[in-house]
Amino acid sequence: MFINCHSYHSLRYGTLSIDDLVEQAAYFGLKELVLTDINTVTGIYDFKKKCEENGIKPIVGVEIRKDNKLLYICIAKEFSGIGEINKMLTNYNCHDIDLPIQNPDFKQVFVVYPLENIPEKLLENEFIGIREEELNFLIRPELKDLQHKMLVWQPVTVSSQKEFNLHKILRAIELNTLIAKLNDKDCCKANERFKALSQLKDEFKFHPQLIENTENLVKQCSFEFDFEKVKNKSSYTKSKKEDVELLKKLAYSGLEKRYGLNHEVAKKRVEKELKVIDELNFCAYFLITWDIVQYSNKMGFMHVGRGSGANSIVSYCLGITDICPLELDLYFERFLNLNRKSPPDFDIDWSWQDRDTILEYIFNRYGRDHVAFCGTNVEFKYRSIFREVGKAFGLPKEELDALAKNPMATHDKNDVVKMVHKYGLLLEKFPNQRSMHACGILISEEPITNFTALEMPPKGFPIVQFDMNVAEDIKLEKLDILSQRGLGTINDTVKLIKEIRGIDVDIRDTSLSKDEAKTNEYLQIGKTIGCFYIESPAMRGLLRRLKCNNYKVLVAASSIIRPGVAQSGMMREYIFRHNNPDKFEFFHPEFEKHLKETYGIMVYQEDVIKIAQYFGGLTLADGDILRRAMSGKSRSIQKLQEVKNNFFKSCKEKGHSEKLTAEAYRQIESFAGYSFCKAHSASYAVESYQSLYLKVYYPLEFMVSVINNQGGFYRTEVYVHEAKMSGGIIRNPCVNTSCFQTVLKGKEIYLGFMLLDGLESKIAHGIAEERNKNGDFKSLHDFIR
């Protein structure tokens, strides 16, 4: 009977989480429930799961609004109906096709109109919603004959007067006005809440046909969805069989290039991985990633494949990654294993200058109907909450600043501020707006609008209406396409060396990017300003304390520099053990057996899994759940607690004392949330080493590229000073010699116009263009003419 329920995914309108909404429905004994958030399907998949946990039949749809006006409510008869609604919303959000005011073209969707928007002719699938307070209108002649097309309409938006007040605050925030200036049309009605089904039917007892119509409509609706079926593009070629054959062919071809013809260990590892990839149906995932990398190589772009994907020798043989898993003893099970239910995850970096070209290729190659960015819910945060709520109450800017910047304990104690606190705290964890995931791309087999409507944020690439957690739940695995300035610096340096010196530097040559004598000297003394990931004061200090003089130590340093490790004291312990390998004892024999390379300390995420498995007796799957939960990649606090309990229970069964177990778990906690997987650290270390090699042998070209890529950890003047210390002669921006970017001529470095604060880019480019066209400027008059 409740055919129009809102959750807080009706942004700045609804006040109930999905959990609260369903739990309240269960409290009232409801057997069916219809979720119809405003212009979004964000919550439908969580809603289905929660309803089924509570024995409630889930039905979903969307409330369609335009310019704050309710047009109609769409209720899907079956899952394909959601796709129809999604296509309509996507056309509106992304293609500027207006929403139909009436009679939308649907086949598997019921449409319910408010009294204010009844079309001249109601189609077979269209109805009119009648609220309890509107029943008196049914005596009108034009409505009396339409009762066979009318439904009981009891919207749900709030659950109490307090939440109704919160709703009004949300509406004021959305409309950028004061609560006192809101009118009735801006807000829901105070009675939009659940009530006993018997009470609702009693209110409509003189109109039994409306009750019957509503019950019949609900009976015709269902929401069937297979959470276990993978929704990604199912094959790269025409079939799974051809995918398997192509992946095998490419893997063995790459095996020969990387290892030669007679490397039995590598061959066995490739065979093992191909078998697992095939069994888990991820051949297409690997091939699509390979295809994107092939395009990148064709365009002459540099990329870095990192994350757990670099644990795979197949990835290495396909050229997706440049980390040899045998050299670093990386185990494939961290990336994929038959017990791991979560999807694989490739993280691939490009230069910030090249990423959009890669994205355009992906959207064009795999079809804009099948590709979108993952969404993310931006929640109300502490500062924004008090500022936004305070504005709704009409507080002046000075007081808003004080509320946002100062701790709650120091705020004024007047009645208005108390109200701001009261309702502000209710807004914590509320979604405020949808945004684009920084890097997650989804590529689906079916049109992606079968699962979600798309929205178009300012960056120009469409996003789905749910986040990465929901995407993972519905088996729509993401591919992370990232960008960074470090690769831009390396790319530009190599080009500059070729342009100025005529030297081709093959920066991917592993003898340069992993082990080079002079580079090792710079590394050991922390002479790394400008170099990717290793230029911060903390990292340079760590390199000196570790006496880091080779690539493998750099790999470890890339992980132990992370925040939680330093705070737990384990970074200090690692440094001591590294420098004094004969002056410490292993925590436990299992630590010595499995963490000997890192002196018995958990440095990488794989180490967490190893200790959970071999010391704690957990399964490989539970060990991975532990790692994911601690790193914030799992939403289930309950699941983490279960695994923690299992860890302590299993340790007790293995004879470990409670004190020993507690210390082991403390160490796991300190690393799991912040440490990198080993492959990720190795990928970062390679790029850091490449940067440092260029800095060592081509310092001026490198520092100019750092400046043009807008640096890293430090302000630009630090890099200018570093260039000067490297022998460069610094020239201030000059209208007759400088360009938009900083340029190198011999040893002279002419700072670019882009460094001048407040100078518009168009004017900066125009100065150089005018000079190139008509020669040097002869005077100030000539310049401004």
Image (cartoon, grey):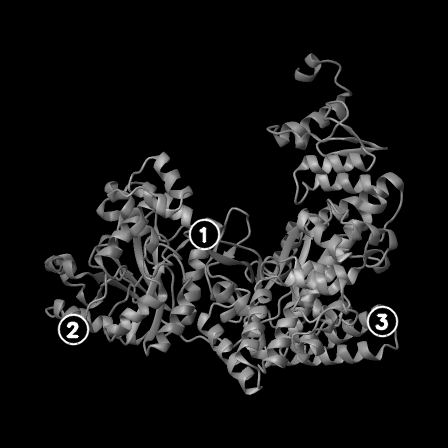
Which residue is pictured at 48% across the width and 63% down the height?
Answer: 449
Find residue 611 and report its horizontal and vertical position in percent: 63, 76
- Against 747, is 278 above or below? below
Residue identifier under label 3: 259
- Against 601, is 96 above or below? above
Residue identifier under label 1: 93
Of mark 1 and mark 2, the one earlier in the sequence is 1
Q: What amino acid is at disc 3?
A: Tyr
Q: Residues within 10 Å of mark 2 (few under 14, many from 20)?
A: few
Where does the C terminus fall, quadrant-wise? Answer: top right
Q: Is residue 452 visible?
A: yes
Of mark 1 and mark 3, the one earlier in the sequence is 1
- Against 428, is 704 above or below? above
Depth order, front residue of 432/639: 639
Find residue 19 and report its horizontal and vertical position in percent: 35, 68
Find residue 467 and report its horizontal and vertical position in percent: 49, 61
Task: Write down the quadrant of residue 617 in the picture.
Answer: bottom right
Q: CA distance from mark 1 to mark 3?
A: 50 Å
Q: Nearer the viewer, mark 1 or mark 2?
A: 2
Depth order, front residue of 701/343: 701
Q: What amino acid is at disc 2?
A: Ser
Which residue is pictured at 67% across the width and 32% down the height?
Answer: 755
Left or right: 199 in relation to 11: left
Report the disc number at residue 198: 2
Which residue is pictured at 24% across the width and 41% down the height?
Answer: 180
